[in-house]
């Protein structure tokens, strides 16, 4: 039974790097991750603590969640997403996925894990004849209306 202040608390998720010093995250390869095996490599941006843009990229809409992921993978396309998911699975890492960044319960971020940030993926295809729209995961409703 939940009471009072904990009713909006986000469930705790564990990670192979959570609660460990950054040296441990480094040992798993997370802090030095450079995806390989893709034609041309990772096309998006990889941000770590101390990098220009890291603090802005880790901030989510709900300011109650002030997390510090080990790495933020700002994916430019599907190949980047696949590389990030595969890396996380191979290393048993905690993963948070961010689309438009409006998760009220903070699921778009995590501490010491890998945030797969889809917000740069804002492509949209409109087929007026079929009356359909295909939108990438980083697009918000505001972007669809434009």
Image (spheres, rainbow, N blue to C red):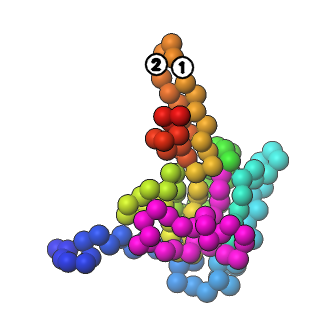
Q: Residue placed farthest to the front in the image?
A: 146
Q: At which x and y percent is residue 122?
A: 60, 42
Q: Is 9 positioned to the left or the right of 45 in the image?
A: left
Asked if residue 8 lies in the magenta stretch, the reply is: no
Quadrant position of the N terminus in the picture: bottom left
Q: Which residue is mark 2?
A: 131
Q: Which residue is mark 1?
A: 127
Relative to 84, is 40 above or below?
above
Q: At which x and y percent is residue 112?
A: 57, 75
Asked if residue 51 lies in the magenta stretch, the reply is: yes
Q: At which x and y percent is residue 56?
A: 61, 67
Give me the residue at 20% from left, 77% from top. Answer: 4
Q: Secondary structure at mark 1?
A: strand
Foreground of the two, 84 or 74: 74
**Mark 2 crowd level (few <14, some 14–19, many ≥20, 10 Å Cα):** few
Give me the residue at 49% from left, 74% from top. Answer: 66
Give me the residue at 46% from left, 19% from top. Answer: 131
Q: Secondary structure at mark 2?
A: loop
What is the number of the mark on residue 19? none
Relative to 65, is 115 above or below?
above
Examine the image and state in which quarter residue 10 appears: bottom left
Residue 23 visible, this orientation: yes
**Mark 1 crowd level (few <14, some 14–19, many ≥20, 10 Å Cα):** few
Residues drawn in magenta: 49-75
Please say if the residues under marks 1 and 2 sit with CB atoms less than 8 Å apart.
Answer: yes
Q: At which x and y percent is residue 15?
A: 51, 73
Give me the residue at 67% from left, 75% from top. Answer: 49
């Amino acid at each position: 039974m939940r009471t009072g202040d904990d009713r909006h608390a986000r469930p705790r998720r564990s990670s192979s790097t959570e609660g460990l010093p950054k040296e441990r995250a480094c040992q798993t390869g997370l802090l030095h991750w450079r995806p390989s095996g893709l034609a041309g490599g990772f096309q998006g941006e990889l941000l770590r603590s101390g990098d220009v843009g890291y603090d802005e990229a880790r901030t989510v809409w709900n300011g109650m969640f002030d997390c510090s992921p080990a790495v933020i993978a700002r994916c430019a396309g599907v190949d980047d997403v696949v590389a990030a998911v595969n890396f996380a699975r191979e290393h048993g890492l905690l993963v948070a996925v961010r689309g438009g960044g409006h998760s009220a319960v903070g699921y778009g971020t995590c501490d010491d894990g890998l945030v797969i940030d889809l917000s740069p993926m804002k492509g949209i295809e409109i087929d007026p004849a079929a009356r359909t729209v295909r939108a990438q995961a980083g697009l918000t409703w505001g972007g669809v209306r434009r």
